[in-house]
Image (tube, helix red, strand yellow):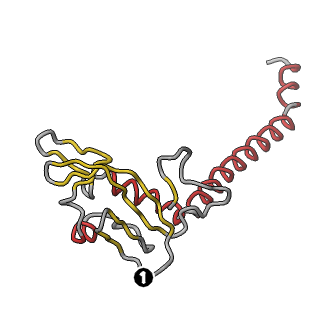
Amino acid sequence: MNKKGGYDVSRKWIYWILALFLFAFMFLYMRNAIASHNDVAVEHLDKIEGAVIISEAIFSPKCFSYYDKDLGRAYPGIIDLAKFNEERFNEDCFVFIENPFTIKLGDITLGNSRDEELEKIIVPVLVKDGEIIRKDKLEIGVMDYYGWEGQDSPREGAYYKRA
């Protein structure tokens, strides 16, 4: 190895130290940015319980959604009136929801509200009562559904509306 090549490598040790310091700083900065974003997202979980309740009630076959055993298929948006009872509500649905809420379909009201003032969300659904399918409204009362800063509605559009 000639003297000039050895001199070039040894001369760049300051460059390598600075580059290593810069890469370490960028790595730690990005790691902290991602971790803090996740912390903020998890901090507001109680504000999205309403969306979880709506999704579970309308889309889950273990909850109130109509399930056709012959086809092995759940029909989201169609509520089976035979499933809409207090027993299924208490045992199969909403096992992780701790805040009080109510669900009302026609004259049947289910829920664990303790006389708190709840915000009402009305969702249009189809109801299967035996062999008859009819239109109805599923009224869900939750706490702080519109609680996020600057959030006027759960989603854009008029599908979900505030009572």
User: Seen from this angle, which residue lies furthest left?
Assistant: 70
The mark total stands at 1
Residue in the image at 40% along x and 56% along y: 54
Residue identified by numbered label 1: 114
Residue in the image at 49% along x and 72% along y: 118
Residue in the image at 34% along x and 50% along y: 125
Q: Is residue 151 left or right of residue 126?
A: right
Above or below — where is 162 with respect to 110? above
User: Seen from this angle, which residue lies furthest bottom?
Assistant: 114
Q: Is residue 116 left or right of residue 128?
A: right
x and y percent of residue 108 in the render?
28, 68
Q: Is residue 13 left or right of residue 79?
A: right
Q: Is residue 8 left or right of residue 141?
A: right
The front one of 45 and 67 is 67
The kind of residue tagged 1 is Arg
x and y percent of residue 136 in the render?
33, 54
The front one of 149 and 43 is 149
The front one of 19 and 55 is 55
Above or below — where is 92 with respect to 6? below
Quarter of the picture holding the N terminus: top right
Q: Quadrant of residue 15?
A: top right
User: Is disc 1 placed on a helix, strand or loop?
Assistant: loop
Label 1 CA crowd tier, 10 Å (few <14, some 14–19, many 20+): few
The front one of 7 and 98 is 98
